[in-house]
Amino acid sequence: MSRKLLVCSSTAALLALALACGKSSQAPTSPSSSATTPDTGAAPDGSTLKVTAPTPVSPVNGAQPDSLVLTATQSQAKFTATAIALQYQFQIFNAGNTLVFDSGPINATVSGSNISFAPSVALTPDQPHTWWVRAIYQGANGPFSPKTPFKSPLGGYIRGNELFDPLVGRRTVGTLNGNAQLTDEGVFLPDHVSSVRYDLQQTIVQGEFSMMIKGLTTQTPGTQGAKSKVFSMQEGGGDITTDDYRATIDFRGKQYPTPGAVTFRIITGDPASRVFDGPRVVVGGWNRDTWYFWRFSWVTGRATLEVREGSETGPVKYLQSTGTGSHEYRPTPHVLYLGTPIARGGLDDSTAAPITIKSVWASSNPRPAFPQ
């Protein structure tokens, strides 16, 4: 059976040496020259790029990193010593071997003989996973590395305009303020001066800020204040009450004329003319031992607050929206709080307490799965 010979310039020869491009299965009778390659087609593993498989470096052997950075050795071309500008594809699988993340072709970070990549993915925390990686060059794929087991991190991350903080394992990526405490259940805010602050690197112009909250009640005097805040957002620091990009999610406490009422306020750039309040609805049946799912979402022109009992799909306790005009919500810098900083309204206008919060997410992307 005949085979093709590609006689090329030095640049094209390098590509010919790295890429298999035909279907003939006959092996050459002598080694290929630097300018030719046999017409070999895909390898038995399906790869079409003549490079070595990367070798995983970390995490390996079931290790559990604090933050997920995948590191492997670089692939090497088999038929030339000249370096090729390779891209890499990283994939992550859960314990059921279901693909949960695919980077596609990316330019990995190179350090010495290794490449590394920090995937922007919210894996279910503290669970077994596997990962592998392969080289890619102009549409041709090299062989995958061996699948390597690891355990997903307990902690979370802040990347760009995305926040993921499970608040398990007594860890947080936020800053604890006042008397806030990390517990086995989440973060505990025992009083009105307690909060957790998150500083995003980029603004969420439209997206959501969501979490699970336990401890809300209308029965105990002296705890939840008249206009307590369960969570909030603003532009930078300063008094949140008149902040140009204030967003506060309110729970009316026992001292308020309508205890148990839920509402929200969002300001889109001007505290004098762009102030929008959500409908104030009295919600009954609060149980301090029950977890409630809270989600505040916003796009240009509308903001929505959703509260459900027990889980993200539980019975609805509050679901209301309000129009917000044509101005974008664009705080710079974008600062988020569990609870709220002390403002001019004093303690009764501060953090709803005592409450416990976990499974915190803020992003323009859909909320991922959290452990229950």
Image (spheres, grey):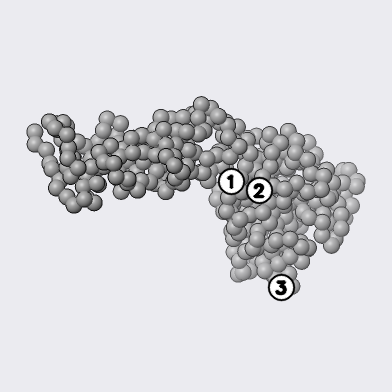
- Residue at point 23%, 42% (across, down): 17
Q: Residue at x 72, y 38 (%)?
A: 186
| Mark 2 or mark 3, earlier in chain | 2
Dot 2 corresponds to which residue?
A: 210
**Three-letter amino acid code at the position of disc 3:** Ser
Which mark sits nearer the N-terminus, 1 or 2?
2
Q: Position of residue 218 (x, y in %)?
A: 85, 45
Element type at mark 1:
loop
Which residue type carries mark 2? Ser
Give how far across and how far down residue 309 sits, in percent.
70, 41
Q: Confirm or deny contact between disc 1 and disc 2 (CB under 8 A).
A: yes
Q: Name the residue carrying label 3.
A: 273
Query: Percent x, y for residue 276?
Result: 71, 65
> What residue sits 68% from the left and 42% below the top?
172
The image position of residue 335, as x and y in percent, is 68, 56
Quarter the N terminus occupies: top left
Q: CA distance from mark 2 to mark 3?
A: 27 Å
In the image: residue 218, left or right of residue 117: right
Kindly report the distance in space between the C-alpha atoms of the residues bearing marks 1 and 2.
8 Å
Disc 1 to disc 3, C-alpha distance = 32 Å
Q: Residue at x 45, y 33 (%)?
A: 56
Q: Is residue 168 left or right of residue 141?
A: right
Q: Amino acid at mark 1?
A: Arg
> Vertically, is 298 above or below 52?
below
The dot on residue 367 is 1
Q: Is residue 367 visible?
A: yes
- Looking at the image, tell me whether mark 1 or mark 3 is earlier in sequence order: 3
Q: In this view of the protein, can residue 286 be seen by the observer?
A: no
